[in-house]
Image (spheres, rainbow, N blue to C red):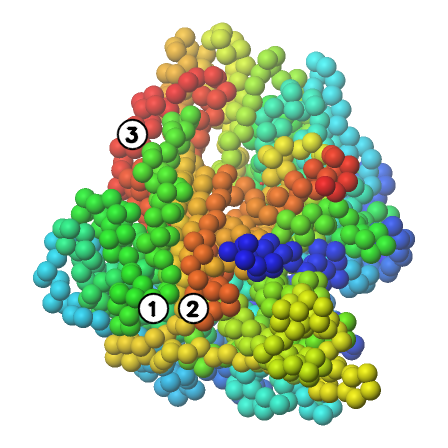
């Protein structure tokens, strides 16, 4: 046994398919022996630090995976290889999908976002992903494709019970579908380094019966959309009181992990006060 | 595999291995030593180069991925041995010390002057936040960028 | 002082512009023809006996030239104590301890081969903290500690893990305990931290056919590398040449011998072939020495009227597996024991303690960072207990030049500086007594804090410098000095001095940043903020010598006496006569009379300097003078504590020193750099270890450095410009000083903001939350009321 801290990357072959069919065929052929590379900001680190693949398949040659499409009333379709910079610069994302935009702008740094993609973020095997919670509150689903066909699953189903991604070895993430957000909705993302992320979305604030409030947490390994928050906010009580009720409820549901980066105790503090901060900001409640 | 890159305006054809990073190819195959490794994990930004008009950390890019692209390093900012105004602004404002991170900051500043002439202090900081400097405490780097922007807006130095 | 001089005191621009324009060369850029690459293999155990290292697979791989293990290199390496193996021999002393070196045609091959090396270990009980290391049952890490070559002033305790023990005794602290009204007893700690210079270490070596060892490496002090190589490997100095290129930051972490001995020894084994070793960032965390963690226990007493009476301390540094400079760092902490204050009775024991962790070494501040981080909290706690304003308390006890007796029992020099002045001015600039403006967000609370420090270079009494100045045919000069350039810009300041002395434009002064030990004169080391002071004085003497020769030649040319010649504006002139001048270029090679007769030949000045009056210290009491000068500094901050995230942001930082400044542009750069580094050390940076002693965060993804976003909104740097006697233009070093006050100033400001004291650095959100819960749970109750509503 010995410790080697590598500088160079181990050997692999680089493949650059130019169509989706070709890409899926390669993935079907090589399965777990191949990793797809989008921005590479996760993959190349993993490979240097120990993950081994025989093939690295670049998905950036497949045009359609780099497209963002918005259709009024139908929503947004984002290709898996769309960069975070493109999302950040996209006016629809900024205006209508604010919670996602807010999260994207807080990922890594300016230079990194020129390469990093949303697909890579979602498929990060270390499960540190700041886009998942925002996508969850937006009700997004993802399209997973292989030679066998495509399937669509809700974003919060991405991580399997007990960890690990839902993708099979021959599958890749191709698109992210985000429905039209509730009219007049607002969103914001609260983040502390790689310790905690909280996404919140709110709409129809002034009308309790139609009020929408959704909150999701991204703690590795399992991002969580807290169901039941919405019900609390449908009650006819002052918002201030509802925020308190919601937080007390959330505290019983969300049990953050303890790891090398932060203790559970600190994360619990963030859950409580970070959520309070976020909800007050979104719902316009003064302290 | 054979790739072609346009580096500082000159087309270069190089044989690379699939596991080589753009950083290594620039340094070892093309001899461009201003592009340096700092952390190799994409954090410190010292290996920053401009690829097709975008600021990119070259330690997290495979050379193969850069095939066909247009790359700018600090060597490409000066013309005929004349440093660019951005480079002169760094000298004028003491925007460097040990010099190891300097090319990355100069390229970042160059990009800012090309793309965000009217950037606010906050916007400048957001972009500069990508690169780490251990010596300067950043103040004189920020001053350098602001000076370069001022020259740019006013059309020429001083 | 700016108006008196044309160049000194002016913000003359740096001339190492190739760093900005391209073309600058660092050791990591070295590529020698036919160069082989070295890859180190290390041990995944903190403390273990090496049972077997099997390199046979690696040697079969095409392109692999050789594999070496510890037994191939039976040398002990080290500066103050030779405690380090080249590669581990017999046992490994820390997780990540190198056990083998693979040499191959390319790094790629070397790394593949390294992965085939199979080693077997027999784990031994490991010591992972200072407390464990000191326990009488602790396993002894260096079993042959007593046999190591060491400097006379280093006192290891064989049979224990104590690498050095230092004593400071002044007055009678035990007795004085009876005469005080208030006593504060506290313990301060810090995790180990990292220099995190941006250039990871790299070094190349080759042996010329005449047997000369040539080394290129990333270091601060070329002559220290040469000296330590010679001493450790038993090579004659005459057979070693160390080349200094630009060095990408050092901060004390590249002060002495780094890993140069590895390429040197390997090249020697391979018939002199050029070999190269470059660490990546993870390796740099494991293989390069870091800043030690500390544990400082302090008991300090004062009378009701605010006079400090006694101080008792136990200062411990966690030296890791190899102590390098740390054994001397603890001397610095101990001998400067009580900061810039006078205390009549002091009793401090300092210890550098071996543990099974990454090796440690010097860090900007050399022991005074640790001291200041601790003692300046102690001062605030005492002030509060006494009910005295912290500034007033500090001023009352501040050292008085020419009057006060220092901890090492000398009278503080008359020209030592202005300890009270820097404190007063920093308090003024930060508006210490003006309450901070309230944040608009009620969960953000602001506070102001201050801390002061003193520091001088703790160096051996014979820490010498020398300089050579050559006058060129065009009236320009070339300056040869041995000091290293790794960002501080000392060579720019030195050039300003030359320009000033000769009255020539600074553009006509050339000081190459690159140097080799066989081509430039000696300087001891580039450490301890001594570069400008020591090399500057040697340079001034060289300039005197040069001017003397110029005058001599000119006097003969003018047929006047030597003292009738003056040098101004790049000319030698007869005093008082404007028309009778000879430009320096016409004297550079000597003077040629109209007849053709030529006198003197090329003019070359030389000068040497060694500090006067510094001595060894008494081993029992510490009495003596360890430092040629001291600089005083005070820093003030305004911080904002975010109770939601428990993150602390520094909104404003002010730094005041008493030093005279040669170049304000460079000095400001040091100041801002020191502030940001201080913020990192205070709030963010920690090297973490897991249960078995492996690093948790040997990567910049997890070792968090200050970035632009951490920059205070406002930073002010001021200097009181107090001239230092026997110093170049009265200037003294500030490089390290600028980093000193921030940890304590920030901790004090947090306390003044929310009434919570954190005595462990860095003050991470995690630690702050814990402290709030323990000390001020009401803050959270209140916060809950306003934010959550319950
Ligand atoms: C310095 C630094 C800071 C960072 N900060 C953040 C942060 O603040 N928040 C955050 O969330 N992340 C952060 N990251 C992680 C990373 O940059 C982002 O998650 C990024 O979005 C990943 O995208 P990518 O395109 O670079 O992924 P890649 O590295 O290309 O891929 C990531 C993983 O997903 C797989 N993959 C990629 N695309 C697909 C696909 N279409 N189908 C199936 N599998 C796929 C890859 O095989 C790989 O395993 C940081 C990384 C670095 C280096």
Q: Element at badge 3?
A: helix
- Tell me residue C691's x, y (percent): 41, 60
Judge the density around disc 3: few (<14), some (14-19), many (≥20) Cα neighbours within 10 Å.
some
Mark 1 or mark 3: which is in front?
A: 1
Quarter of the image for residue B14 reads bottom right
**Distance from Cα at disc 2 to Cα at disc 1:** 10 Å
Nearer to us: label 2 or label 1? 2
Give the image quadrant in which the ligand numbered 1 is located.
Answer: top right
Q: Quadrant of residue A243?
A: top left
Q: Chain of mark 1?
A: C
Residue identified by numbered label 1: C413
Helix, strand or loop at disc 1? Answer: loop
Above or below C29: residue C419: above
Which quadrant is the N terminus of chain B positioned in?
Answer: bottom right
Going by the picture, which residue comes out furthest to the left?
C178
Q: Nearer the viewer, residue C594 or A199?
A: C594
Picture coordinates of residue C404, whole percent (x, y): 26, 65
Question: Within the image, what quadrant is residue C205 found in?
Answer: bottom right
Provide residue C509's location: percent of width, then percent of height: 68, 67
Pick the residue in front: C156 or C506. C506
Q: Where the C terminus of chain B falls, by quadrant?
A: top right
| Residue identified by numbered label 2 | C725
Labelled pair 2, 1 in contact (Cβ < 8 Å): yes
On screen, residue C399 versus residue C258, left or right, reads left
Q: Looking at the picture, does residue C429 appear above or below residue C552?
A: above
Q: CA distance from mark 1 to mark 3?
A: 53 Å
Pointer 1 and pointer 3 on the same chain: yes
């Amino acid at each position: 046994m010995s410790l080697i801290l590598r500088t160079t990357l181990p050997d692999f072959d680089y493949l650059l398919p130019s169509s989706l069919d070709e890409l899926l065929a390669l993935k079907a052929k090589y399965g777990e022996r191949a990793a797809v590379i989008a921005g590479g900001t996760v993959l190349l680190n993993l490979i240097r630090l120990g993950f081994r693949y025989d093939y690295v398949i670049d998905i950036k040659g497949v045009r359609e995976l780099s497209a963002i499409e918005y259709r009024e009333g139908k929503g947004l379709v984002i290709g898996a290889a769309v960069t975070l910079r493109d999302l950040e610069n996209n006016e629809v994302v900024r205006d209508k999908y604010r919670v996602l935009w807010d999260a994207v702008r807080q990922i890594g740094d300016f230079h990194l976002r020129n390469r990093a993609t949303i697909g890579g973020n979602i498929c990060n095997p270390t499960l540190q992903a700041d886009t998942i919670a925002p996508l969850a509150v937006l009700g997004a689903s993802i399209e997973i494709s292989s030679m066998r066909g495509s399937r669509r699953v809700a974003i919060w189903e991405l991580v399997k019970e007990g960890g690990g991604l839902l993708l099979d070895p021959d599958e890749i993430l191709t698109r992210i579908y985000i429905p039209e957000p509730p009219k007049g909705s607002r969103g914001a993302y609260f983040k502390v380094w790689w310790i905690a992320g909280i996404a919140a979305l709110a709409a129809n604030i002034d009308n309790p019966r139609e009020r929408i409030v959704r909150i999701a947490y991204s703690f590795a390994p399992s991002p969580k959309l807290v169901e039941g928050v919405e019900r609390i906010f449908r009650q006819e009580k002052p918002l201030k009181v509802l925020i308190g009720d919601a937080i007390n409820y959330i505290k019983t549901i969300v049990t953050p992990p303890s790891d090398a980066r932060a203790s559970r105790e600190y994360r619990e503090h963030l859950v409580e006060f970070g959520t309070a901060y976020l909800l007050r900001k979104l719902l316009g409640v003064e302290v | 595999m054979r790739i072609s890159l346009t580096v500082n305006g000159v087309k270069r054809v190089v044989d690379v291995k699939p596991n080589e990073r753009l950083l290594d190819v620039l340094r070892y195959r093309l001899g461009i030593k201003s592009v340096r490794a700092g952390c190799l994990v994409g954090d410190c930004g010292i290996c920053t180069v401009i690829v097709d008009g975008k600021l990119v950390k070259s330690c997290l890019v495979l050379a193969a991925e850069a095939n066909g692209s247009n790359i700018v390093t600090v060597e490409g900012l000066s013309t005929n041995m004349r440093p660019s105004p951005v480079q002169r602004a760094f000298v004028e404002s003491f925007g460097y010390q040990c010099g190891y991170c300097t090319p990355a900051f100069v390229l970042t500043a160059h990009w800012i002057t090309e793309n965000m002439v009217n950037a606010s202090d906050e916007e400048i900081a957001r972009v500069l936040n990508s690169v780490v400097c251990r010596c300067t405490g950043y103040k004189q780097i920020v001053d350098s960028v602001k000076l370069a922007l001022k020259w740019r807006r006013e059309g020429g130095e001083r | 002082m700016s108006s008196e001089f044309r160049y000194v005191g002016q913000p003359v621009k740096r001339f190492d512009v190739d760093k900005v324009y391209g073309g600058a060369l660092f050791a990591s850029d070295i590529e020698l023809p036919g160069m082989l690459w070295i890859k180190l293999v290390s041990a995944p155990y903190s403390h273990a006996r090496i049972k077997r290292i099997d390199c046979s697979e690696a040697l079969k791989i095409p392109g692999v030239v050789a594999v070496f293990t510890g037994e191939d290199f039976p040398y002990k390496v080290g500066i103050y104590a030779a405690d380090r193996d080249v590669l581990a021999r017999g046992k490994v002393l820390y997780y990540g301890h190198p056990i083998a070196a693979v040499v191959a045609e390319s790094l790629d091959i070397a790394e593949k081969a390294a992965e085939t090396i199979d080693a077997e270990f027999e784990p031994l009980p490991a010591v992972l903290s200072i407390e464990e290391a000191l326990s009488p049952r602790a396993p002894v890490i260096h079993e042959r500690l007593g046999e190591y070559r060491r400097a006379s002033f280093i006192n290891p305790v064989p049979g224990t893990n104590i690498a050095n023990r230092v004593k400071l005794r002044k007055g009678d602290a035990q007795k004085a305990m009876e005469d005080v009204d208030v006593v504060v007893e506290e313990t301060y700690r810090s995790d180990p931290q990292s220099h995190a210079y941006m250039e990871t270490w790299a070094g190349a070596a080759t042996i010329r056919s005449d047997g000369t060892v040539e080394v290129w490496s990333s270091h601060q002090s070329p002559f220290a590398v040469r000296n330590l190589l010679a001493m450790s490997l038993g090579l004659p100095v005459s057979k070693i040449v160390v080349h200094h290129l630009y060095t990408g930051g050092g901060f004390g972490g590249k002060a002495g011998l780094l890993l140069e001995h590895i390429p040197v020894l390997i090249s020697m084994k391979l018939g002199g072939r050029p070999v190269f070793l470059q660490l990546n960032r993870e390796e740099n965390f494991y293989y390069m020495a870091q800043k030690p963690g500390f544990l400082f226990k302090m008991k300090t007493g004062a009378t009701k009227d605010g006079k400090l009476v006694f101080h008792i301390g136990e200062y411990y540094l966690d030296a890791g597996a190899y102590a390098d400079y740390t054994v001397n760092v603890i001397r610095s902490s101990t001998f400067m024991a009580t900061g810039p204050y006078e205390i009549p009775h002091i009793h401090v024991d300092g210890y550098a303690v071996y543990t099974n962790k990454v090796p440690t070494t010097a860090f900007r501040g050399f022991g005074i960072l640790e001291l200041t981080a601790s003692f300046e909290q102690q001062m605030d706690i005492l002030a509060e207990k006494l009910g005295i304003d912290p500034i007033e308390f500090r001023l009352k006890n501040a050292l008085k030049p020419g009057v006060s007796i220092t901890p090492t029992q000398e009278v503080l020099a008359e020209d030592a500086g202005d300890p009270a002045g820097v404190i007063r001015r920093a308090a003024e600039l930060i508006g210490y007594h003006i309450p901070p403006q309230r944040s608009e967000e009620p969960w953000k609370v602001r506070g102001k804090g201050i801390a002061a420090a003193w520091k001088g270079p703790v160096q051996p009494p014979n820490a010498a410098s020398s300089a050579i100045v050559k006058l060129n045919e065009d009236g320009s000069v070339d300056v040869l000095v041995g000091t290293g350039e790794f960002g501080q810009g000392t060579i720019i300041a030195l050039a300003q001095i030359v320009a000033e002395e000769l009255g020539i434009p600074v553009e006509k002064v050339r000081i190459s940043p690159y140097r080799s030990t066989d081509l430039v004169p000696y300087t001891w080391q580039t450490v301890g903020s001594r570069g400008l002071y020591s090399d500057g004085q040697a340079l001034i003497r060289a300039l005197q010598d040069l001017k003397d020769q110029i005058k001599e030649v000119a006097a003969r040319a003018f047929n006047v006496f030597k003292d009738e010649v003056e040098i101004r504006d790049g000319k030698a002139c007869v005093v008082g006569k404007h028309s009778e001048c000879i430009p320096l270029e016409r004297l550079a090679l000597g003077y040629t009379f109209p007849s053709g007769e030529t006198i003197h030949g090329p003019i070359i000045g030389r000068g040497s300097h060694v500090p006067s009056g510094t001595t060894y210290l008494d081993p029992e009491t510490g009495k003596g003078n360890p430092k040629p000068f001291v600089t005083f500094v005070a820093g003030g901050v305004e911080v904002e504590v975010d109770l939601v995230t428990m993150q602390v942001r520094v909104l404003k930082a002010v730094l005041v020193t008493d030093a005279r400044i040669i170049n304000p542009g460079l000095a400001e750069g040091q100041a801002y750099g020191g502030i940001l580094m201080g913020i990192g050390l205070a709030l963010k940076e920690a090297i973490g270890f897991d249960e078995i002693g492996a690093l948790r965060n040997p990567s910049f993804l997890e070792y968090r450095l200050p970035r632009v976003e951490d920059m205070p909104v406002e930073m002010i740097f001021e200097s009181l410009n107090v001239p230092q006697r026997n110093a170049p233009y009265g200037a003294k070093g500030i490089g390290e000083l600028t980093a000193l006050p921030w940890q304590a100033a920030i901790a004090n400001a947090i306390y003044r903001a929310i009434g919570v004291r954190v005595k462990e650095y860095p003050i991470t959100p995690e630690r702050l939350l814990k402290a709030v819960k323990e000390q001020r749970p009401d803050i959270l109750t209140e916060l809950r009321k306003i934010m959550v509503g319950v």
